[in-house]
Image: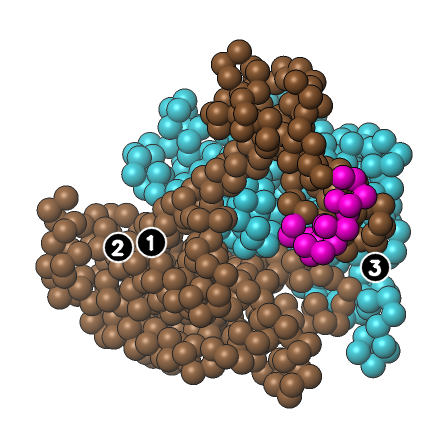
């Protein structure tokens, strides 16, 4: 095996995988609630949130960025509701108005301020910099047990690991209320589940996952991982538990395979330049969804005539 | 500021004027085409279409370079983007119709995967040996700086074409947007109309790539239509207003960015459109926030007036401040809260109306009458004078409250 694998590829793969899992877990519920595009909206409004946080604090630190992006997500959710209720506008259009305008504002703020000294620009926000998250202190697999080398791990790794763990814990803890309120909101209310709070909490944890992942891998992966693995998993089974497990498997496969293909694929084809890992991970997740849509056991709508389902 | 005014008056140079006209035409076309998309409740499909253009742009560049041409030729890039946008649209359609995934999941999947693939292609291009810095990134956020004369002509021409098609097919598209079943029953092919609508949207997206950029062109399709919706309930006016809002946004945005060439054009145009939206959200009659507040206040007053009058008639003490204020303002009570002559008369009438309602609801226990009872509706608007006279016979004439 490539001697530099641990140094150059291991941490990006782990970070990409953790980010994918952190996004795909809330994504399952968003897809089932037909709120898949909330992920899209969130990943757009993260940008103005981060820019404003940077303008206020003057530093690119994870905590202010997390707070700023979270605040932006809340503002966006609030604005979407205002537009939807007051203007009696359909939710899709309301969302389209709010997140495009906020994204435009973010881009403009970013271009207006001098961020050349810090690592903050629109393309980075879109594509991430997964490839640059290398582990310089590593010399080989043995470094995994070397405390000195471990201290040199990229900070993004611990950050995304923490967020991913938090998302997993939240999903497990709130499993029943989440499940009930996703499938039968009326029933959930009757048995005393605070459905509004659950829905809001879901959006917020999706936002947190998006911000943490965004920092490391860019917003393309965030949207792709919110939607593609859960959508593919939905076509595999009719049980939520199994669907979530499938989605995690798909997310991990997309992240690992995508990174490997982006990093090593061009070499196999004789080119010596890697391509965008974030883009490739999104592409692989799309290929998985395509395969699921063609061959998965539960791909057809229940009750759809056979001819149409084929 | 002077530079901006100059730019608005086409004084900032020939190219800048062309770009402003092109952007305005694009905005009008986007507003008009977006109106149908919005009415059909498929606004976010445009998001998938827009993001799906990126791999086409990349592929077109690679193909053109491979064929020995100039990779940056705008018509070629736009043709490529149209092809991949069409592919994205077909995938959304196929996923929604042939699998159990809902449209929003299909949209999200297509936009993220196509965009990801596009980014992969962009990184391939960056490392291509031809080495020409393609500047394809400008398609992400739009840039009018360094736009060629021919490019502006392409944009203006395509914008005008979209507009013409919208004008010709506005009736069938309106029909399909409001009542697809009726449209199908009356012989129109809803699928063909939808296809036409999506083709128009695609055209706007593709043309808008250069000016607004693919991430934000969806805003130009959605925001003007939503803005127009605040001002009217009629389709023809909706399209007209959306076109005007979009056109002004494109025009002003392009002019502003001609003055500040460092800023990407797309976000400026979008924010100008959003400003129009925000103003509409605040002040539009009927649907605006101010109108909602005014309506709420008026409603509140009616309730307090009615309850206050009933309290006067029943000689109950009134404690609520707002009720007292409303009654005093209409000279129905004196400052010491004793009813005036008019107050007593109106109170008696309110009580009589309440009594009439009571009888009416007992006589007509059906929804048509009782469903209208909310303590505010005048009974004269529900029952005929004969019916009211009959009720009055049962309860006796108006009685003044004692005292």
Q: Say which residue label 2 marks.
A: B252
Q: Secondary structure at mark 2?
A: helix
Answer few, some or many: residues within 10 Å of disc 3's Cα (few below 14, many 20 plus, some between 14 and 19).
Answer: many
> Nearest the camera: A182 or B323?
B323
Chain shown brown: that is B
Residue at image point 72% right, 71% down? B97
Residue at image point 34% right, 62% down? B244
Answer few, some or many: residues within 10 Å of disc 2's Cα (few below 14, many 20 plus, some between 14 and 19).
Answer: many
Q: Are marks 2 and 1 in contact (CB under 8 Å)?
A: yes
Residue at mark 2: chain? B
Residue at image point 28% right, 54% down? B253
Q: Is residue A20 above or below residue B35?
A: above
The answer to whether residue A96 of the structure is visible from this angle is: yes
Residue at mark 3: chain? A
Magenta region's main secondary structure? helix
Bounds of the magenta segment:
B380-396
Query: Do the residues at pointers 3 and 1 share their chain?
Result: no
Residue B389 located within the stretch drawn in magenta = yes
Q: Say which residue label 1 marks.
A: B269
The answer to whether residue A47 of the structure is visible from this angle is: no
Q: Is residue A293 above or below residue A245?
A: below
Q: Is residue A106 left or right of residue B297?
A: left
Answer few, some or many: residues within 10 Å of disc 1's Cα (few below 14, many 20 plus, some between 14 and 19).
Answer: many
Separation (CA) of disc 2 from disc 1:
7 Å
Residue B118 located within the stretch drawn in magenta = no
Q: Is residue B246 left or right of residue B390?
A: left
């Amino acid at each position: 095996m490539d001697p530099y694998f641990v140094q150059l590829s291991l941490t990006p793969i782990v970070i990409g995988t953790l980010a994918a899992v952190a996004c795909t877990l809330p994504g399952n519920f968003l897809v089932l609630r037909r709120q898949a595009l909330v992920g899209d909206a969130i990943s757009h409004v993260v940008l103005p949130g981060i820019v404003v946080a940077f303008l206020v604090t003057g530093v690119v630190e994870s905590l202010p960025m997390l707070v700023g992006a979270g605040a932006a997500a809340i503002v966006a959710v609030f604005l979407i509701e205002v537009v939807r209720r007051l203007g009696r506008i359909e939710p899709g259009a309301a969302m389209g108005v709010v997140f495009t305008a906020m994204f435009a504002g973010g881009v403009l703020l970013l271009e207006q301020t001098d961020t050349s000294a810090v690592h903050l620009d629109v393309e980075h926000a879109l594509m991430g910099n997964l490839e640059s998250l290398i582990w310089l202190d590593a010399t080989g697999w043995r470094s995994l047990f070397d405390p000195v080398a471990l201290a040199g791990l990229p900070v993004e790794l611990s950050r995304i690991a923490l967020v991913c763990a938090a998302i997993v814990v939240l999903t497990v803890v709130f499993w029943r209320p989440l499940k009930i309120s996703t499938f039968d909101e009326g029933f959930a209310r009757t048995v005393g589940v605070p459905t509004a709070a659950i829905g809001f909490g879901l959006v917020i944890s999706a936002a947190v996952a998006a911000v943490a992942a965004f920092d490391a891998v860019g917003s393309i992966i965030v949207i792709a991982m919110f939607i593609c693995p859960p959508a593919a998993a939905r076509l595999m089974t009719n049980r939520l538990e199994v669907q979530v497990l499938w989605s995690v498997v798909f997310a991990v496969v997309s992240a690992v395979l995508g990174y490997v293909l982006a990093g090593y694929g061009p070499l196999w084809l004789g080119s010596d330049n890697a391509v965008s890992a974030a883009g490739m991970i999104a592409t692989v997740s799309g290929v998985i969804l395509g395969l699921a849509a063609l061959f998965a056991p539960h791909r057809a709508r229940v009750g759809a005539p056979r001819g149409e389902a084929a | 500021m002077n530079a901006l005014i100059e730019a608005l008056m086409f004084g900032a140079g020939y190219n800048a004027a062309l770009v402003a006209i092109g952007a305005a035409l694009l905005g009008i076309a986007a507003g008009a085409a977006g109106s149908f998309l919005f009415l059909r409740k498929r606004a976010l499909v445009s998001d998938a279409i827009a993001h799906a253009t990126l791999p086409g742009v990349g592929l077109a560049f690679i193909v053109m370079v491979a064929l020995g041409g100039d990779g940056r030729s705008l018509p070629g890039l736009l043709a490529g983007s149209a092809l991949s946008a069409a592919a994205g649209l077909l995938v959304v359609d196929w996923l929604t119709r042939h699998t159990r995934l809902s449209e929003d999941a299909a949209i999200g999947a297509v936009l993220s995967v196509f965009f990801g693939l596009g980014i992969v292609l962009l990184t391939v291009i960056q490392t291509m040996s031809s080495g020409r810095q393609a500047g394809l990134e400008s398609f992400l956020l739009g840039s009018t700086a360094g736009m060629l004369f021919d490019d502006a002509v392409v944009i203006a021409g395509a914008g005008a074409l979209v507009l013409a098609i919208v004008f010709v097919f506005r009736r069938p598209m309106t029909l399909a947007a409001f009542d697809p079943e009726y449209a199908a029953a009356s012989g129109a092919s809803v699928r063909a109309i939808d296809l036409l609508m999506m083709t128009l949207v695609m055209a706007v997206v593709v043309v808008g790539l250069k000016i607004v950029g693919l991430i934000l062109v969806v805003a130009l399709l959605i925001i003007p239509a939503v803005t127009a919706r605040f001002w009217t309930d009629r389709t023809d006016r909706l399209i007209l207003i959306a076109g005007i809002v979009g056109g002004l946004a494109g025009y002003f945005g392009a002019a502003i960015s001609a003055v500040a060439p460092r800023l990407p054009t797309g976000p400026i145009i979008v924010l100008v459109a959003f400003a129009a939206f925000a103003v509409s959200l605040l002040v539009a009659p009927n649907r605006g926030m101010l109108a909602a507040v005014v309506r709420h206040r008026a409603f509140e007053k009616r309730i307090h007036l009615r309850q206050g009058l009933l309290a006067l008639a029943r000689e109950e003490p009134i404690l609520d401040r707002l009720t007292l204020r409303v009654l005093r303002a209409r000279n129905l009570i004196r400052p010491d809260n004793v009813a005036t002559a008019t107050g007593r008369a109106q109170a008696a009438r309110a009580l009589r109306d309440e009594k009439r309602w009571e009888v009416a609801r007992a006589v007509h226990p059906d929804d048509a009458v009782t469903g209208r009872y909310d303590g505010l509706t005048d009974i004269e608007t529900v029952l005929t004078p004969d019916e009211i006279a009959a009720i009055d016979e049962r309860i006796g004439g108006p009685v003044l409250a004692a005292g």
